[in-house]
Image (spheres, coloured by chain):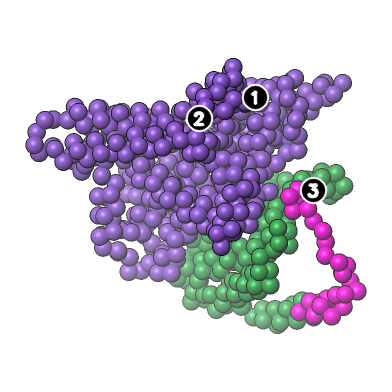
Chain colours: A green, B purple
């Protein structure tokens, strides 16, 4: 099956992701910022689909949009939005912000300029039909140790959250 | 153009796999119309069934036996004034019902009504359904917050906590069924029988084909493990769709109407539509994973071969049992038509009831006509899968109504306790037991 209108969809999704990102930092209302972040995450899921990584796209939607962002909104909804809107934003962090974004931008530019030497030129050939199975083989075969370490880290974080939330342990 | 349209008819896959945009559009429109019609039927059935369970009559005035009540309601909702609280956040307030409806209908892209009767088949079909339907909670949270009112906010908080919690148990139950697709061997314990099929899959069509290959519905696989995981999913899906006895987000006695208290008219009806479409969607996940999807009961039992010239060809998979069960759609529709005629005949013999009587008789004639069309061999062979799938989903929808009229509502702490302390540990235990049993049986069979 041939991909449909690939450049068009790429620019559409990339544009939506950027639009969402800009809205996240410019909206004064935190709930609107969170909703804009959801737009960015959905656009990224679409880009993963275009990279022939359907499993990552599906997990992106389930975890980030359906799980994490819902909990984000859950907390933000309980904040007094009226007061948050009046407060000064970017509390004198703009120097750090400019330095960080300049560094990241230069990294991107250099990767773009020197990209041919850094990345393989040929397209990765991925089996779209058995994408999930391939990922499973890699995760539970070649990279089992790294996978287990990551899950242990998450378990520690989870126990930490429970300990912090509980008044008496 | 004509060749483009007819070229799909020779392929055996879904229109999405064939890449035929015309048939994709046709399928999407058909499924949209079908689900919308299902929601209309549910509206009427829910009131009638609940009324009869509570020894009432239910709607009787609009049309014979209240059959036209859903249309009268739709008209009323469209004519109602569309209100918005003054302090509400207007963008989010207007976006929420749209998001909920779009999400509820998007999941039907991968629902397999038959081996080729789906819009498309995805490698991540099940993941897609769970992911997109988990976005419904966003719409509910947005609606509750944007209304800028106490009851909707409390309802939205309850529903987000509830849906996120039950998604975990639901995911574990689903994993058990996905794990079963990867097993070799046929029959309940994978011993003997067919030895085909093996790689696990998340594709909705692939899951049903695995059940056909292993000659068992996954609800009976590794008895009682498949049954337990199905029960966990069946409980979690009621909580996911915010239905009784888990309808705390819209508990009338405490929160008026929960997250959609401030909505009225057309926007309220969008929430209603989305709720019922989501019920149909999760029911079809359950049917696909555990109840054999489009497979008819006893799909491997054919009986002695039989041939009727011009109507039924003899073949290895065309026995007497196949012939009898192929007539099920006909019997169902003609039977429903017959019930309508009975109702028309029993109606009071008063000139005032003449229009109602004629209307009911005409409706019965229409149903019987649909049944007779299903006798035509070309139609009969194509509607088999759809009939069995829809019949199984319909049973699940009836259960929803049954729960609502029999179970009292849970308290919120009880709800959380059931989700985290009962369902989740059992689901994880069943998952581990299934994995262990599968590995052991395959090792024994290989030895």
Q: What is the x, y in percent for residue B273?
A: 40, 51
Give the structural element (helix, strand or loop) at label 2: loop
| Residue closest to the far front | B309
**Cβ atoms at labels 3 and 1 below 8 Å apart:** no
- Chain on which label 2 sits: B
* Residue A134, numbered circle: 3
To the question of a shared chain for discs 3 and 1, the answer is no
Image quarter of the N terminus of chain B: bottom right
Q: What is the x, y in percent for residue B11?
A: 64, 48
Residue count near mark 1 (Cα–Cα under 10 Å), binned few <14, some 14–19, many ≥20 = few
Q: What is the x, y in percent for residue B282?
A: 52, 42
On the image, which quarter does residue B410 sit in? top left
Work out how far the residue at label 3 is from the one at label 1, CA to CA, in angstroms. 37 Å
| Residue bearing mark 2 | B311
To the question of a shared chain for discs 2 and 1, the answer is yes
| Residue closest to the far left | B351
Residue in the image at 70% along x and 41% along y: B201
Q: Magenta stretch: residue A122 in it?
A: yes
The residue mark sitting in front, 3 or 1, is 1
Point out the stretch of residues depicted in magenta. A105-131
Nearer-N-terminus badge (2/1): 2
Residue count near mark 2 (Cα–Cα under 10 Å), binned few <14, some 14–19, many ≥20 = few
Q: Magenta stretch: residue A9 in it?
A: no
| Residue closest to the far top | B304
Residue B405 visible in rendering: no
* Residue B316, numbered circle: 1
Work out how far the residue at label 2 is from the one at label 1, CA to CA, in angstroms. 16 Å
């Amino acid at each position: 099956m041939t991909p449909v209108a690939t450049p068009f969809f790429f620019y559409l999704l990339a544009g939506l992701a950027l639009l969402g990102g800009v809205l996240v930092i410019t909206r004064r209302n935190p709930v609107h910022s969170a909703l804009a972040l959801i737009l960015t995450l959905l656009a990224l899921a679409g880009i993963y689909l275009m990279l022939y990584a359907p499993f990552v796209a599906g997990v992106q939607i389930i975890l980030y949009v359906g799980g994490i962002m819902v909990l984000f909104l859950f907390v933000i909804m309980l904040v007094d939005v009226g007061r948050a809107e009046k407060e000064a934003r970017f509390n004198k962090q703009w120097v750090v912000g400019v330095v960080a974004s300049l560094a990241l931008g230069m990294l991107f530019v250099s990767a773009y300029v020197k990209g041919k030497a850094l990345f393989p030129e040929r397209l990765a050939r991925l089996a779209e039909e058995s994408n999930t199975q391939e990922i499973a083989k890699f995760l539970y075969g070649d990279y089992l140790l790294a996978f287990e370490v990551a899950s242990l880290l998450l378990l520690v974080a989870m126990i930490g959250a429970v300990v912090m939330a509980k008044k008496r342990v | 153009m004509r060749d483009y349209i007819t070229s799909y008819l020779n392929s055996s896959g879904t229109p999405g796999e064939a890449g035929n945009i015309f048939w994709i559009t046709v399928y999407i429109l058909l499924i949209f119309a079908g689900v919308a019609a299902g929601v209309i039927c549910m509206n009427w059935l829910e009131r009638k069934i609940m009324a009869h369970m509570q020894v009432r009559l239910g709607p009787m005035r609009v049309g014979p036996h209240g059959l036209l009540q859903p249309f009268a309601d739709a008209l009323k909702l469209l004519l109602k004034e569309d209100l918005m609280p003054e302090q509400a956040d207007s963008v989010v307030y207007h976006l929420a019902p749209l998001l909920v409806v779009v999400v509820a209908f998007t999941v039907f892209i991968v629902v397999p009504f038959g081996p080729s009767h789906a819009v498309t088949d995805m490698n991540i079909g099940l993941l897609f359904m769970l992911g997109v339907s988990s976005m419904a909670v966003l719409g509910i949270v947005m609606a509750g917050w944007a209304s800028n009112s106490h009851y909707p906010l409390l309802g939205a908080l309850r529903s987000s906590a509830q849906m996120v919690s039950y998604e975990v148990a639901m995911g574990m139950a689903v994993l058990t069924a996905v794990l079963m697709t990867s097993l070799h061997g046929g029959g309940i314990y994978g011993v003997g029988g067919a030895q085909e099929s093996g790689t696990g899959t998340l594709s909705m069509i692939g899951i049903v084909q695995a059940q056909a290959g292993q000659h068992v519905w996954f609800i009976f696989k590794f008895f009682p493990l498949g049954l337990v995981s199905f029960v966990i999913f069946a409980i979690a899906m009621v909580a996911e769709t915010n239905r009784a006895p888990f309808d705390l987000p819209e508990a009338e006695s405490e929160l008026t109407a929960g997250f959609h208290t401030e909505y009225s008219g057309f926007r309220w009806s969008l929430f209603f539509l989305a709720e019922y479409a989501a019920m149909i969607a999760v029911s079809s996940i359950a049917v696909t994973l555990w109840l054999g999807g489009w497979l008819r009961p006893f799909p491997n039992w054919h009986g002695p071969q039989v041939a009727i010239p011009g109507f039924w060809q003899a073949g290895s998979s065309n026995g007497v049992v196949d012939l009898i069960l192929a007539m099920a759609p006909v019997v169902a529709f003609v039977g429903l038509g017959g019930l309508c005629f009975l109702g028309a005949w029993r109606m009071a013999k008063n000139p005032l009831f003449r229009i109602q009587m004629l209307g009911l008789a005409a409706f019965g004639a229409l149903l019987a006509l649909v049944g007779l069309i299903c006798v035509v061999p070309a139609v009969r062979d194509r509607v088999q899968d759809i009939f069995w799938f829809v019949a199984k989903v319909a049973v699940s929808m009836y259960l929803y109504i049954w729960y609502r009229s029999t179970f009292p509502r849970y308290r919120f702490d009880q709800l959380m306790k059931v989700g985290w302390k009962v369902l989740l540990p059992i689901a994880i235990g069943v998952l581990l037991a299934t994995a262990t049993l599968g590995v052991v049986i395959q090792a024994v069979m290989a030895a």
